[in-house]
Image: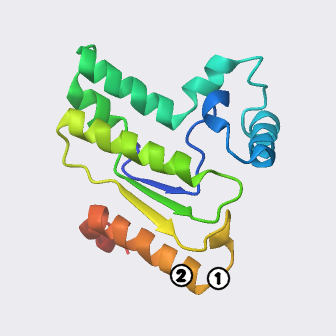
Amino acid sequence: ADTSVQLCIDIYGVHDFTKEDREHSDRHRAKQMQLLCENVVMQVTIKDDEKFYHDASPTKIVKRMIQDIKTGSVSTEISAQNAIPPTLLIHGDKDSLASLMETRDYYKELKTLRSCNHSDIKDVLAEVPGGHHGFGYVKTPRSIATALAIASFMHHHFGSVMESRL
């Protein structure tokens, strides 16, 4: 059975765990994010293993792939088609934990990667007005609209496959 990742639904994600890219204009939020990363997500401080943070950051991975394509050190088919599936990024514009700007930057890098690869993969960034971090946990018109957007994205990519499994 094919167990490769076919699609990515990324809801209010953190796309760069490295210290320099985690700095926000809001110092309190930057400190919260650093503590969350070090104590819960990464379980090691950035001082102790900066390479681990770098290697775990989707934005850094995509930037590295772009560089590899531009230098010819990797096949374009391998780099984008197989490694980064079509991605739906959903992020609230009132998120006080994860940075919307970081999500926008990641989306921009994904578009650059697709362009370098001459890929027809279409990634989508959906900015949710009024959405805070975790807005989807409670049933509201906003979370219902988000669920419908996810279903639509999935149907676009897997329509006939999804219908045959229901």
Position of residue 133 measured from the top left corner of the image (x, y, whole percent): 67, 62
Mark sitting on residue 9: none
Q: Earlier in the sequence, mark 2 or mark 1?
A: 1
Quadrant (top left, top right, bottom left, bottom right) of the C terminus: bottom left
The reply, left or right, for residue 48 in relation to residue 82 is right
Q: Residue at 49% of width from left, 80% of height from top?
A: 145
| Secondary structure found at label 2 | helix
The reply, left or right, for residue 62 in relation to residue 90 is left
Q: Which residue is mark 1?
A: 139
Q: Which residue is mark 2?
A: 144
Question: Most extreme residue toward the front, as rendered?
Answer: 25
- Whether 124 is drawn above or below 102: the answer is below
Position of residue 131 measured from the top left corner of the image (x, y, whole percent): 61, 70
The reply, left or right, for residue 109 in relation to residue 157 is right
Check disc 2 and give the amino acid type. Answer: Ile
| Secondary structure found at label 1 | loop
